[in-house]
Image: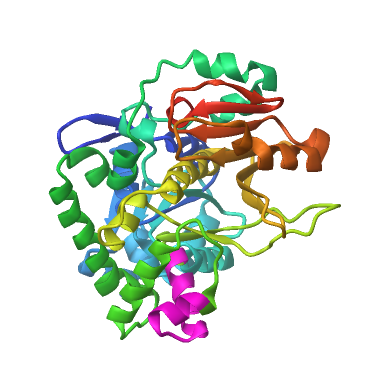
């Protein structure tokens, strides 16, 4: 198993490690992307000590990549190019090297920008590269288990076996607010116990993003305005994206809001969850919902706001995304909302079936909490699996036919 060694020598397995190994075994290049400080460089460095690693955060390496990329990546053995988005023209030299001699695992490319990197890679490495995203650490990764929640097990089991499956899990209750506050970045999530220490780390993270990383993507002169937009987005967690209202909140024109939200999504700090828009009988909402890439950063930017139900949704979302992105077979993730206000927080589409999930911050699930899940299942018939109602209490029981109420910590 591939591991990441923590600052206190604790060994922390990562969920994507096996998937990364499989891709390097087959493809000449693998592109590993994710937000800065998720552990990409550490994972790449622990993958195989014999790999030559060159980081374009090093100005000398970056200059060499610009002046003579062929010489930089020449020589025997596999090579890791870290933060390759800093010199995307280097990818042409990588392409030529692959075409001269095609070998599995020849290049591992890491980057902290999604769309910018993907666009350049798709132009130069089509058919030569596989792609993988490293998300912030899941709850079980933080506990040293190297995995995500039980999404795969639930999909592989019969619906009627879900209760026994979750009851067999030897999990103990946990305060979801503490998990939301520390987020999933390895340093604050695992190594910093004090809230004040985490606040110092998050402040440095946001400053580095604004003052350096953001400038690599686009020239932003009005950094205070950009930070105000970040805070406004954090305060709208779990809500429909309305760029006009966001712009009104921070006194910015809608086109600027649109461009800056794209930059946040490009760098994995923000995500827009698409709507599941397939229905034969209902008129559905199609606007995306807004979530943050890490709840710890979101709460820090929120400046004193307390974790709420939307933050618990965000915790669940990040766990599902980590599972989805490490999976070889593609799964899709949506939310569902009708024009009359019926809503399901998450819908996993995998294997031609739909798994609806509702997240409630309350500790006592009631039959009324399941009404939108029941509406969804009635709407999609046999295509819909049983539904999950995740809550903060201890009840594990069938709340209604086809709706299982389960503590969030038994699944995540």
Q: Is residue 271 left or right of residue 139?
A: right
Asked whether residue 255 is drawn in magenta, I would say yes
Residue appearing at x 70%, y 27% in the figure: 402
Picture coordinates of residue 382, whole percent (x, y): 82, 33
Picture coordinates of residue 290, whole percent (x, y): 50, 60
Residue appearing at x 26%, y 62% in the figure: 303
Magenta-drawn stretch, dominant element (helix, strand or loop): helix
Picture coordinates of residue 411, whole percent (x, y): 49, 28
Residue appearing at x 17%, y 47% in the figure: 195
Picture coordinates of residue 18, whole percent (x, y): 46, 33
Q: Residue furthest right?
A: 280
Q: Is residue 210 left or right of residue 398?
A: left
Q: State the image quarter where residue 83 is shown.
A: bottom left
Viewer-side residue, 282 vs 154: 282
Q: Is residue 2 left or right of residue 280?
A: left
Q: Quadrant of the C terminus?
A: top left
Q: Is residue 383 left or right of residue 275?
A: right
Viewer-side residue, 214 vs 358: 358
Viewer-side residue, 322 vs 180: 180
Q: Against 150, is 94 above or below?
A: below
Q: Against 66, is 405 above or below?
A: above
Asked whether residue 294 is drawn in magenta, I would say no
Q: How is the image coloured?
A: rainbow
Viewer-side residue, 16 vs 411: 411
Q: What residue range appears in magenta?
A: 245-265
Q: Is residue 369 visible?
A: yes
Q: State the image quarter where residue 393 is shown.
A: top left
Q: State the image quarter where residue 211 is shown.
A: bottom left
Q: Against 174, is 93 above or below?
A: below
């Amino acid at each position: 198993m591939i591991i990441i060694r923590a600052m206190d020598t604790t060994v922390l397995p990562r969920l994507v490690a096996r998937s990364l190994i499989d891709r390097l075994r087959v493809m000449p290049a693998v592109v590993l992307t994710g937000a800065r400080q998720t552990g990409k460089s550490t994972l790449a460095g622990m993958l195989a000590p014999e790999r030559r690693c060159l980081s374009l955060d090093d100005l000398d390496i970056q200059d060499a990549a610009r002046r003579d990329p062929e010489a930089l990546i020449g020589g025997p053995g596999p090579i890791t190019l870290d933060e390759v988005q800093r010199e995307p023209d280097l990818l042409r030299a990588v392409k030529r090297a692959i075409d001269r001699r095609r070998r599995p695992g020849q290049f591992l490319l890491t980057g902290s920008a999604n769309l910018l990197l993907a666009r350049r890679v798709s132009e130069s490495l089509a058919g030569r590269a596989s792609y993988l995203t490293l998300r912030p650490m899941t709850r079980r990764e933080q506990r040293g288990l190297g995995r995500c929640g039980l999404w795969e097990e639930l999909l592989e089991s019969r619906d009627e076996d879900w209760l026994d499956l979750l009851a067999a899990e030897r999990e103990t209750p946990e305060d979801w607010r503490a998990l939301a506050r520390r987020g999933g970045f390895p340093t604050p999530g695992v190594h910093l116990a004090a809230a004040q220490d985490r606040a110092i780390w998050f402040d440095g993270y946001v400053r580095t993003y604004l003052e350096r990383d953001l400038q690599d993507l686009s020239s932003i002169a009005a950094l205070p305005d950009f930070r105000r937009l970040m805070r406004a987005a954090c305060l709208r967690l779990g809500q429909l994206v309305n760029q006009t209202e966001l712009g009104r909140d921070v006194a910015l024109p809608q086109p600027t809001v649109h461009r800056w939200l794209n930059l946040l999504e490009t760098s994995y700090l923000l995500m827009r969850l698409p709507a599941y828009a397939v229905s034969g009988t209902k008129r559905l909402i199609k606007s995306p919902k807004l979530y943050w890439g890490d709840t710890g950063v979101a709460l820090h930017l929120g400046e004193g706001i307390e974790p709420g139900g939307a933050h618990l949704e965000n915790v669940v979302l990040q766990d599902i995304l980590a599972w989805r992105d490490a999976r070889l077979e593609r799964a899709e993730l949506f939310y569902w909302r009708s024009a009359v206000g019926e809503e399901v927080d998450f819908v996993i589409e995998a294997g031609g079936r739909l798994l609806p999930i509702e997240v409630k911050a309350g500790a006592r699930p009631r039959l009324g909490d399941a009404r939108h899940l029941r509406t969804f299942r009635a709407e999609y018939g046999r295509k819909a699996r049983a539904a999950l109602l995740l809550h903060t209490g201890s009840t594990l029981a069938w709340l209604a036919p086809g709706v299982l109420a389960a503590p969030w910590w038994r699944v995540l």
